[in-house]
Amino acid sequence: MKTLFLDSNYMIHTDFKVGYIAVETDMFDSYCDTALENIRYIPKNASWTRQDGLVYYGPFIQFQSTEAVNSAQKQFTLDSDNMMSLADVAELVELVYQDDMEVIEG
Amino acid sequence: MIGRTNSLPIGGGGTSAIDAYIAVTYPVGSVCTCTNGSKTLRASDTNGLIVFSIPSAGSWTVTASKTNQTASKTITVAANNLYEVTLNYRLPTDIYQAVRYIGSTLNGNQDISTNITPGGSFSTLVTRIKFSPVVLSGTTYRCIFAYEYGTSGTAHDSELYFKDGSAEFGHTSTNVVNQILTGTPVAGQVYETTQTVNGSTGEVTYTGTPSGTISADSAFANGSWKNGSLEFFVRAGVHSPIQIYECTVTKDGTLIADLIPCYRKSDSAAGLWEHVSETFYTNTGSGTFTVGEDIEL
């Protein structure tokens, strides 16, 4: 669960500024800050009008992908996967330790 | 052919020498023409309706075009007939906005079930899909697309999946369990593969990434089960964090589905527009699809 902030155009920001609306959601937990800052998130029951007059109705989530965003997200995902692997190893070590302790303690 | 009309819109070439007309309904704002190769008639305005007065029998092609979009149909014209033609672009852009992809969120329950089916009988079924895994974590088999026949508990299905924890692509069905394909899923990477099914033997071949061959899949060898319908993001209740960029289905050489990611402008609902049947498939699960940036087709 992350706390994110929306500006008047419903673009996501990871840092608070005056005028931003705070939202708590787990929908974007798998995204890096660079990707998050390129997402328009219009919550349910909210709406946003584009310059040409087209009205968007929430819930609506749109990514503005660029090479930089894609690259940052890929790296973030790789790092996350590696972190998960480390966590898996740690869990395995813990299980082996517990098994050993049970044998030692009889 | 349709019945004669009492009044014809002006601009299609005057009175027809052979008393043959083509009435065309086309997207408003488009240029509409009618040609037999040597003579071209052109609608005088772009209001979406024109009746062309055809001067000679034979093959005539009507075309509508508008910024990067074209639609056309060819009619064999005979004397003393009135033909009615409707031209639509691949995506009706006055109603929908095309996007690069639609995607599901991590642990989301978004999915799309369609009415697209091989229809119980075919020699060759070709499904081409462009997709991207959103994340790789956990140990779940994640459906990319599947043909599913029957209801939960009695379903017979055939699925292309990726398994996130062990980073594998595979094909699974009622009788083919976890057949691993060549290729390694990477989160954020876009893949394109074409699945070709032999309707007689049930052999399934993937070309592109992933790739590989499954010798016989009963879900495609059994006539009834070939009534299965195409679904995305889910199989047997298990949802997948993926993005769909495009998908087409060709049955015995005929395009039966052309799915385009988009959102509906009137309510911002995201989904897949199917061009052949002109059907909009939106979320049949829960949650909200993500969409990529707006694009022009």
Image: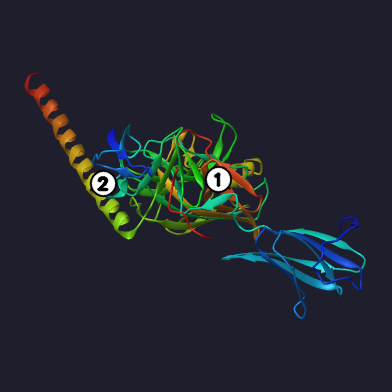
Task: Tell me if residue B90 can be seen.
Answer: yes
Q: Nearer the viewer, residue A1 or B230?
A: A1
Provide the chain ID for the residue under circle 2. A
Q: In the rendered structure, are the residues bearing label 1 and label 2 in contact, judged by CB atoms less than 8 Å apart?
A: no
Type of amino acid under label 2: Asp
Q: Is residue B235 left or right of residue A7?
A: right
Judge left or right: residue B54 versus residue B276. right
B189 in relation to A101, above or below: below
Query: What residue sits right under mark 2 in the picture?
Result: A33
View extreme (top): residue:
A106
Residue drawn at 66 percent across, 50 percent down: B277
How dense is the environment of label 1, judged by Cα within 10 Å: few (below 14), some, or many (20 and up)? many
Disc 1 chain ID = B
> Which disc number belongs to residue B264?
1
Where is residue B126 shown, x and y percent of the image?
Answer: 57, 56
Indicate the quadrant containing the C terminus of chain A: top left, top right, bottom left or bottom right.
Answer: top left
Quarter-of-image position of residue B105: top left
Q: Determine whether the residue tagged by mark 1 lies in a helix, strand or loop.
A: strand
The reply to the same-chain question for discs 1 and 2 is: no
Q: Position of residue A98 (x, y in %)?
A: 13, 26
Q: Residue B129 location, x and y as percent?
A: 50, 54
Tell which of B79 and B187 is nearer to you: B79
In this rendered view, identify the residue nearer to me: A38 or A32. Answer: A38
